[in-house]
Image (cartoon, rainbow, N blue to C red):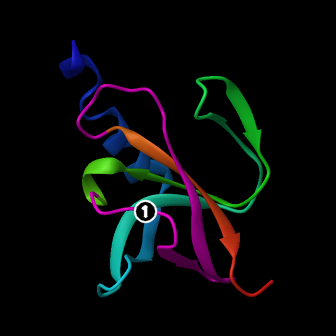
Amino acid sequence: MTAVFDGMASALADTFGALVPYTPAGKATRPVQSILRRTPVRAIGPDGVDELVNSPTWRVRRDLVPELKRGDLVEDAQGTLRVLNVWPQGSPAADAHLICELEDTTE
């Protein structure tokens, strides 16, 4: 059944995303094709309920960032953001997206 979903997240990130600089703890920064937004987005919360996330978010394929955890950094033209929470989005696909709730490090 997972084969039905494979490739969908990749297509979304390729179409709507950009290369976002990602810095995992203790490692070098690398560009990751993904979607970083500073506007509110809807996401499936940790309890499985649809939620509105008002903080900046980073939508990224989990297979591109297997080491992803709280405290890692991403960047956009407005500055550096720290990962606060990582929420799986329920897809069984190997390339499923994660939603990362972010905080601005300059505030």
Towards the viewer: 84 or 16: 84
| On screen, residue 7 above or below 26 | above
Question: Left or right: 45 with respect to 31?
Answer: right
Local SS, label 1: loop
The region drawn magenta spans 66-95
Please state the horizontal and vertical placement of residue 38, each as a whole percent of the image. Answer: 72, 62
Q: Quadrant of the C terminus?
A: bottom right
Question: Left or right: 104 with respect to 85?
Answer: right
Residue at figure coordinates x 44%, y 26% from the top left = 90
| On screen, residue 27 above or below 33 | below
| On screen, residue 28 above or below 35 | below
Q: The residue under label 1 is which amino acid type?
A: Lys
Please state the horizontal and vertical placement of residue 9, each as a whole percent of the image. Answer: 37, 39
- Is residue 91 covered in magenta? yes
Question: Left or right: 20 with respect to 42?
Answer: left
Q: Label 1: which residue?
A: 69
Q: Quadrant of residue 52?
A: top right
| On screen, residue 106 above or below 52 | below
Residue at figure coordinates x 37%, y 76% from the top left = 24
Please state the horizontal and vertical placement of residue 20, each as a whole percent of the image. Answer: 45, 72
